[in-house]
Amino acid sequence: MTDRPLPAPSGPTHRPTPAAAPAVPDGPAVRSTADGPAAAPALDGPTADAWHALGGPSALLERVSFHGPDAVLPSRLPVRRLARATVAACSLAAAELAALRSGGPVPRVRIDQGAVATAFVSERHLRIDGRAPVSFAPLSGFWPTADGWLRTHANYPHHRDRLLTALGLPEDTGPERLAAVLRELPAAAVQERAYAAGALAVAVAPVRATTLPLVEVRAADETAPRPLAPAPVDRPAAGIRVLDLTRVIAGPVATRTLALLGADVLRLDPPHLPEAEDAHADTGFGKRSARLDLADGTGRAAFEELLATADVVVTGYRPDTLDAYGLAPDALLARRPGLVVVQLNAWGWTGPWAGRRGFDSLVQAGCGIAVVEAGADGRPGALPAQALDHGTGYLVAAGVLRALTGQRTVRPGGRHLRYSLAGTASWLLHGIAPTADPHVLPNDEPYDPARWLTETDAPYGRLRYALPPVGYAGAPADWTRPPGRWGTDAPAWH
């Protein structure tokens, strides 16, 4: 078993600091009293942490409350608290922008824990004409090695092929043969061979004390933002143009949420990189999707035309991957002053692992979550949801919404925001209290996810899907359009 620490952060950061907020109980946000009316809402610690990390004004936190079943997302780690806090921060940021654009007061935020729990496993609830998508491929999972455990990710065909090549195995290798080979090898050695081959395998590591920032926010220029017309409360991001250069879950969840709130979201993918259509059927709600080759002159010109009127660019690739195409944050901000640029990666932005590929499951393995969640037999475990992906997605959306508001109320100019799955994992492991307030009784309301599922017809077929968990007075209840086929839209704004 490796003993690799997470990379240490550097540069200006915003960190969750529980001590900065008032005392924060878990459980219901409003308590009843024996001799008077209900007490004022009690602030939720993780929500305050996330909101403060995003630079949100503390006074708005008293507008947040929670309801619904407590018995959701069971885990040794405080996953329920992380999940509801990320959705609450996103909802409060949406409410704040809604007030700015509607001219009314900031709507109250009321988060249903059942809706949050259902949305955090939206990919598991998805049905396409009654068919359940396959979540993990046969060669993805935990494997015992000569000295510990290894987690692999081989869902995409090219990652599967690279893993087998790294191990010198034929392309028709099945789980049994892979398991036999890995049992004879040290976990760290396989990890490094896989990395060198462009494959994905991470040795299961213990929890270390090193912490990472939840989000890094940098103000760029002082360009005055373009005026925004009044917008209804349920569409606070109406008229905002978002270029979505993300894949898999975290980034697409963020941009799916911005589309829910009225943004014009256009996802762009390179034509040579495959995508799981089932994944897009889950995260493509409200958006359009096009393929664009940035290495081609015509494709590059089309991108520059889109960028010229974009408000937000969200990227989900490894550091420096997009730099060769002129898409480094500073380059984007130089060509489009006033832009909100978001970067998202797996392992953080400093240290030797910053440039490595990663997914939620691998970060769970590499940062110690798999050890904390291990079973009685010692086999590594996993969180009840891909909570690093989903939680980071809502934090990204919250950051974008806060940036749009801040540009018009606090300081004009561009913004550069950086997130990582490892940063969210660090918050879960070190920044959120795992225990509830002993003075607050848990809400024993039964949890039935069917309450937050619905159906619609789409180009993929009849979809059953999870409703969005964003909750504020006047919030949209659903997306205005189902996902279209991946990569089939024109690379143009509405």
Image: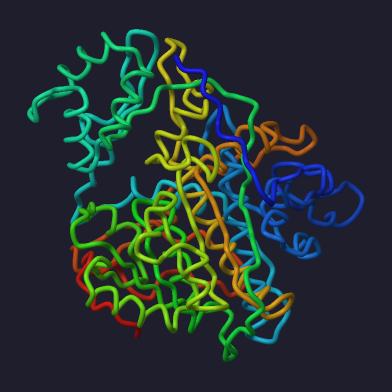
Q: Residue furthest toward the right?
A: 35
Vertical placement of residue 357 versus 119, above or below = above
Numbered-mark total: 0
Residue 487 x/y as whole percent:
22, 67
Q: Can I make out residue 270 in this image?
A: yes
Taking 453 as reference, is 30 left or right? Answer: right
Residue toward you, 24 or 438:
24
Query: Residue at image x 66%, y 32%?
Result: 434
- Image quadrant holding the N terminus, namely top left
Q: Can I make out residue 458 in this image?
A: no
Vertical placement of residue 374 versus 91, above or below = above
Taking 23 as reference, is 183 left or right? Answer: left
Where is residue 217, by image quadrant? bottom right
Vertical placement of residue 355 versus 196, above or below = below
Query: Residue at image x 48%, y 43%?
Result: 387
Where is residue 110, by image quadrant? bottom right
- Image quadrant holding the C terminus, namely bottom left
Residue 339 x/y as whole percent:
53, 74
Residue 416 x/y as whole percent:
57, 63
The colour mode here is rainbow
Taking 192 as reference, is 473 left or right? Answer: right
Query: Residue at image x 20%, y 12%?
Result: 180
Residue toward you, 94 or 342:
342
Residue 223 x/y as whole percent:
63, 82
